[in-house]
Image (cartoon, helix red, strand yellow):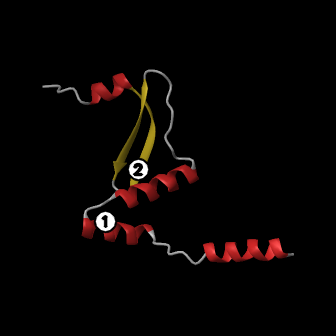
Amino acid sequence: MKCIAIALGLFLLGGCGTYHTLEELEDQALATGDWSEVERRESKIAMRTGQSGMSCPSGMTYLCQRGGVTEGCACVAFDDVQNSFVDWD
């Protein structure tokens, strides 16, 4: 019973720590210029949601495009990306 009380006490103490939202961290980073905490939080969020990076087949790269309010990401062939930057005049 004593072990359960100690474990419960430690659990409750862990909940007393300060937690800053991502927005608060961004505001602080804007003021100080130190973005390391924001990057650390975003990295944790990406790991938790499984977005640590998409792996594409050989000869392809992961490309995201924005169009207005929509954003789409997909694996695209290197040749297609290179051809999209060719000057046609």
On residue 56, the disc is none
Residue at label 1?
29
Outermost residue on the left side: it is 89
Mark 2 and mark 1 lie on one chain; the one further toward the N terminus is 1
Distance between the alpha carbons at the discs numbered 2 and 1: 26 Å
Seen at 68% across and 73% down, the residue is: 10
- Is 34 in front, or is 89? 34
- Is 70 in front, or is 7? 7
- Is 30 in front, or is 78? 30
- Packing grade of label 2 (10 A; few <14, some 14-19, many >=20) is few
Q: Position of residue 75 (x, y in %)?
A: 46, 33
Q: Position of residue 59 (x, y in %)?
A: 43, 21
Residue 5 visible in image: yes
Asked if residue 22 lies left or right of residue 27, the reply is: right
Dividing the picture into quadrants, the one containing residue 3 is bottom right
Outermost residue on the front side: it is 2
Residue at label 2?
71
Q: In this rendering, is residue 75 above or below 26?
A: above
The type of residue carrying mark 1 is Ala
Q: In this rendering, is residue 75 above or below 4?
A: above
Residue 69 visible in image: no
